[in-house]
DNA sequence: TGATGGGTATGAGAAATCTCATATATCATG
DNA sequence: CATGATATATGAGATTTCTCATACCCATCA
């Protein structure tokens, strides 16, 4: 798997290898703690992360999921924001940490990097807008099925129900109702450490709304 | 109103005045026709625009609304996309058109511009994500009230019902049902050329969900 | 002139979702 | 150990939203 090509090569106009360190995370690991002052730039080469933020009232809110390849912490690096959101690995992640102290100026003047970042952010925006627009029209049954597949790659769903319900934009009550449906259908099985996926095929078809699992 | 400062000054590292032309649009005017190959970069200095796209099935879909100040057509300009979406003025707009043919290279290597754009796109993304996340939890009555205020600054609501319903993520049927409610409440009045707003205060309070207008 | 299709409009019943109430379990903390 | 805060869990009834069915109006087009 060790490429001859350096994976960051395409994203910068100069050699960032001297300033970069590869960090690996397992699913569930915390990549960035919320509220830290962060001066490094991260590049997610492989994996998927979850971004979350704590609201004034203390509730934790899931903001979005981001798939590789993507930059993380770019707004802070550009000086457009002070504190980072919380970032957690959902899948095993390979992540490059580029220290800001030693090449910040150079990066901020690297047109290759800046153009790449503009394009990636623009596409992320368009993609996200389209996705959230279309997803809002599906009933929770479909959205939850998709959410479970996305957040439980190892076959066990462990998200906090309160946070998941808030992210999906529905009541906690209703969320639990649909989740219980999945258990009754035999799609999920409740265990001591989470909900085990027994029928991922069923989840997939539900998330596409082809078949129904009428109780 | 004629400033001494050139409004694009802060967004570029060189003088773009020679390449820029100010264009004004009235509410309803088409700024960019969909599907055109576009090589210019636009900067929206004042106003609000609506972005829409035609789907494969022929239906027109409202993608998003964008408020000044913002760049338009930046993805095409960066070469990340071929064809533009349709862009229509919602409010009277002041828009700078920067011809690509004569300074494209220079702009693509202007770190001031690129950094500005990265920051603006990043913020747009975060803002949009937060907004769509929270708005999805309000019932249509609130979202429609907000939508009407946003799209009918002159006091007359003229959006196509099919498109509006799709944008708001609800059925056409339900959309009409709630719209009829507003008319019954005396908030809107149906005229030959659209729905006239009779009680914008009522719309505002509905969009914030303070008061209810029980039928 | 008679189709045909899209936007508009309305009704009735079903399904999805919310609100409110209540109960248990868990966990940190004094 | 007691206490309060938070997550989990379930029930019942109200409200929102969807599906399906049916019209009407007004273009365009053969």
Image: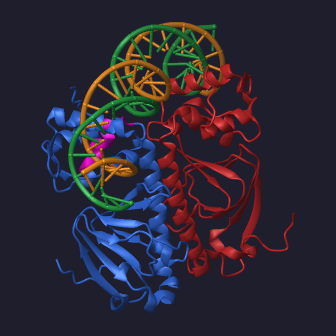
Chain colours: A red, B blue, C orange, D green
**Which residue lies at the image location 74% right of the left edge and 31% below the top edge?**
A197
- Residue most toward the right? A1
Along the viewing direction, whichever of B106 and B194 lies nearer the viewer: B194
A169 is higher (above) or lower (below) than A15:
above
Which region is colored magenta?
B138-149
- Image quadrant holding the N terminus of chain A, namely bottom right
Residue at 44% x, 60% y is B54
Where does the image place residue B71, in percent across and percent down from the top left? 40, 71
Q: Main secondary structure of the magenta part?
A: helix
Does the magenta portion include A178?
no
| x then y, percent, for residue A81 | 48, 60
Residue nearest the observer in this picture, A74 or A45: A45
Quarter of the figure that contains the C terminus of chain A? top right
Residue found 48% across the figure and 72% down from its top: B83
Q: Relative to the observer, which residue lies in front, A109 or B175? A: B175
One can see residue B8 in this view: no
Horizontally, residue B43 falls left or right of residue C22, namely: left
Residue A15's image quarter?
bottom right
- Residue B79 at x, y = what percent? 54, 77
Q: Where, by quadrant of the figure, is residue B188 drawn?
A: top left
Q: Using the rendered image of the protein, determine whether residue A141 is visible from the camera's viewpoint.
A: yes
Question: In this view of the protein, which residue sits in the foreground, D2 or A22?
Answer: A22
Please report the residue visible at 74 percent of the width from the left and 42 percent of the height from the top: A153
């Amino acid at each position: 798997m060790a490429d001859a090509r350096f994976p960051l090569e395409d994203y910068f106009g100069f050699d960032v290898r001297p300033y970069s360190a590869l960090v690996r995370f397992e699913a569930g690991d915390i990549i960035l703690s919320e509220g830290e002052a962060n001066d490094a730039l991260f590049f997610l080469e492989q994996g998927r992360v979850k971004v979350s933020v704590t609201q004034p009232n203390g509730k934790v809110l899931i903001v979005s999921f981001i798939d590789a390849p993507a930059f993380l912490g770019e707004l802070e690096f550009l000086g457009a924001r002070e504190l980072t959101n919380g970032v957690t690995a959902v899948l095993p992640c390979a992540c490059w940490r580029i220290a800001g102290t030693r090449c910040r100026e150079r990066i901020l003047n690297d047109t290759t990097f800046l153009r790449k970042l503009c394009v990636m952010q623009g596409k992320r925006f368009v993609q996200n807008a389209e996705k959230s627009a279309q997803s809002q029209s599906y009933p929770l049954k479909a959205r939850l099925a998709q959410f479970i597949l996305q957040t439980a790659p190892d076959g066990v769903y462990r998200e906090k129900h309160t946070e998941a319900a808030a992210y999906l934009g529905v009541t906690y009550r209703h969320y639990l109702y649909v989740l219980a449906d999945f258990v009754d259908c035999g799609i999920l099985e409740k265990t001591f450490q989470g909900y085990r996926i027994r029928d991922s095929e069923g989840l997939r078809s539900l998330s596409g709304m082809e078949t129904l699992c009428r109780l």
